Image (tube, rainbow, N blue to C red):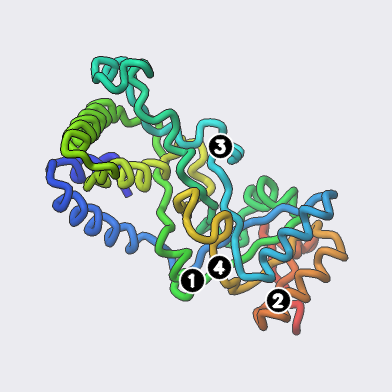
Amino acid sequence: MDYFKAMHILNMSDNSIVKAEVFKAIYQVIRMHIPDVLYKYYSLSDNEALNAKKFQTLCDGKIYMSDIKDFNDPFDGKGFFYDATQLADIERLKPHGGRFIDSFNTYIKATSLTSNGIQSMPMWAHYSNNHAGFCVSYDMRANIGLSSCTFPVQYTDVRLNVTSLMRTQAQKISDEIDRQTTLGNKEIILDDLTIVFMACLLCNLKHISWSYEREFRCTTGAIAEGMPYIDARPREIFIGINCAQSHAERLVEIASSWKIPVYQMEFSECSDHYALTAKNMHE
């Protein structure tokens, strides 16, 4: 996916209805890039209360959705920017120095999935507490709710300047507020989802140094129904090599309750294959 190009196409028209149709077309292209199966790595630690919450969330068939500001990359959500000083002459924004939106991330919750599968040793090390946690696979065809808001991450070493777009939107919104206020409307209705479309697409930008993660990001509105959880039925559970025995036993119980396979990850000391193997614990 090229979200820079998608934003350019999206804003070739000023008509809100046309933009909505263009976004639908872009969204359909995005669907073509979603694999049938994606994986999520989970860490487990000495904090047993937190571990219990993670087990219960898995047992309930859900995934916890985080604030992007809590992700491990402090530059997440920084793939685009706007220069507020170029909006400072808009009357309604003068008291705010031209600031229109402080952070798009405030309005979004997200969770990260990967197409790396279970053979990625960096994923086990970085996101599963050095193999002490577990990994879950999800069938994206069966989990329609999860799949419908999942986007492939675009890795880039450049940032997108959206100043002109933000200025256009800020002026349009300001003018519409003035117009509807003059008409005596107590509720201001804005028929333009450009900012929403932009947030949906551009929150999936990350620096190219993270490309080894092969991330797919599920994003929803921060106040959407059900937050901070999204429904996600597990397909398989994989237990890390260094997972504590008590944690492994709990994962086996959860897999049994879902009637899904559960595997213990292993590494053979006498094999010429530099890879992990997954042993089915029900065999």
Query: Given the image, on which type of amino acid does mark 2 rest?
Result: Ala
Residue drawn at x 53%, y 41% is 68
Query: Given the image, on which type of amino acid does mark 4 rest?
Result: Ala
- List the residue tagged with mark 4: 232
Marks 1/3: CA distance? 26 Å
Q: Nearer the viewer, mark 2 or mark 3?
A: 3
Marks 1/4: CA distance? 6 Å
Earlier residue among tags 2 and 4: 4
Earlier residue among tags 4 and 3: 3
- List the residue tagged with mark 3: 69
Quadrant of image for the C terminus: bottom right
Marks 4/3: CA distance? 23 Å
Q: Nearer the viewer, mark 1 or mark 2?
A: 1
Residue 255 is tagged as 2
- List the residue tagged with mark 1: 143
Q: Is residue 88 left or right of residue 157?
A: left
Query: Given the image, on which type of amino acid does mark 3 rest?
Result: Lys
Marks 2/4: CA distance? 14 Å
Q: Is residue 86 above or below residue 184?
A: above
Question: How crowded is the residue under tag 4: few (<14 C-alpha within 10 Å), some, or many (20+)?
Answer: many
Do the residues bearing badges 2 and 3 touch, measured as CB atoms within 8 Å? no
Marks 1/2: CA distance? 17 Å
Q: Is residue 173 left or right of residue 270?
A: left
Q: x%, y% of residue 250?
A: 80, 69
- For this rendering, which residue is in front, 43 or 100? 100
Do the residues bearing badges 2 and 4 touch, measured as CB atoms within 8 Å? no
Query: Given the image, on which type of amino acid does mark 1 rest?
Result: Asn
Residue drawn at x 77%, y 53% is 50
